[in-house]
Image: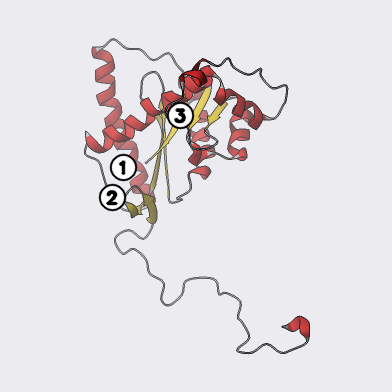
Amino acid sequence: MRATGKKPRGKEPKAPETGPQAKDQINLTDEESRIMPSADGFVQGYNAQAAVDVASMLVVATTLTQQTNDKQQVEPMLSELKALQDRFGKPDTLLADNGYFSNTNIQACVKQKITPLIALGREAHHLSLEQRLTPDAPEPETADSLVKMAWKLKTQSGRALYAKRKSTVEPVFGIIKQVLGFRQFSLRGLDAVTGEWKLVTMAFNLKRMQVLEQGSGKSTSKSLLAGQN
């Protein structure tokens, strides 16, 4: 209405005020926790992450955050993995679902010379026989990391490698919840809960190493994948 020269009706709008408001609420049990989306709706909690070795299913690194968006969690996990290189070597591939996809995350992997295989969208669970037998398209002649990753995800080897995410990191979180019975944190505060998450994944690793020892299994793969809780 100002464009027509007429004075707008009502009160002049006020700019939004920063800082806590009188009616704002906090969680009195753990004020550092946040509302997180889950399969059952929304819960008050934290976003727990884990990097899992493809061959052994051992958790090799963990992070925990108040942020709900997984897209922000790749770089912190890469930093954790980089700190372990002297002892465990550098991962060659990072597998992650579409929740972790961003061009920034792709470039972060490439910068550390790790091949990213991050889903570009919802992946089809069952390909037709024709799709499974179709020869791979030629590798694109480009320096664009996103284009290269998109091509790799469509190759037979890329699909087979990405499929390992569902049989490694997802079962780890399932076992932690269903077998170990860990469904909620007992401690309060970001630092304390971070330590509790590391303790829980350590307990999982102990059980997993017992299984590997019984089966004389030895991990040789350096491929890693990021998971979410």
| Mark with earlier residue (2, 1) | 2
Q: Is residue 56 left or right of residue 71?
A: left
Q: Nearer the viewer, mark 3 or mark 2?
A: 3
As measured in the structure, the alpha-carbon distance from the residue carrying label 3 to the one carrying label 1 is 21 Å
Amino acid at dot 3: Leu
Q: Secondary structure at mark 2?
A: loop
Residue 196 bears which disc, if any? 1
User: Residue drawn at (31%, 53%), measured in percent from left and top?
Assistant: 188
* Crowd rating for badge 3 (residues with CA inside 10 Å; few <14, some 14–19, many 20+): many
Is mark 2 in CB contact (under 8 Å) with mark 1? yes
Total labels: the figure holds 3
Q: Is residue 68 left or right of residue 40?
A: right
User: Residue drawn at (23%, 13%), measured in percent from left and top?
Assistant: 214
Which image quadrant is residue 107 in? top right
Residue holding disc 2: 187
Amino acid at dot 1: Glu
- Quadrant containing the C terminus is top left
How was this image coloured?
A: secondary structure
Amino acid at dot 2: Leu
Q: Secondary structure at mark 1?
A: helix
* Crowd rating for badge 1 (residues with CA inside 10 Å; few <14, some 14–19, many 20+): some
Is mark 3 in CB contact (under 8 Å) with mark 1? no
- Answer whether residue 168 is visible to the viewer in this image: no
- Quadrant containing the N terminus is bottom right
Q: Nearer the viewer, mark 3 or mark 1?
A: 3
Tell me residue 185's x, y (percent).
28, 47
Tell me residue 216's x, y (percent).
28, 10
As measured in the structure, the alpha-carbon distance from the residue carrying label 3 to the one carrying label 2 is 27 Å
Q: Secondary structure at mark 3?
A: strand
- Answer whether residue 31 is visible to the viewer in this image: yes
Residue 225 bears which disc, if any? 3
Which image quadrant is residue 105 in? top right
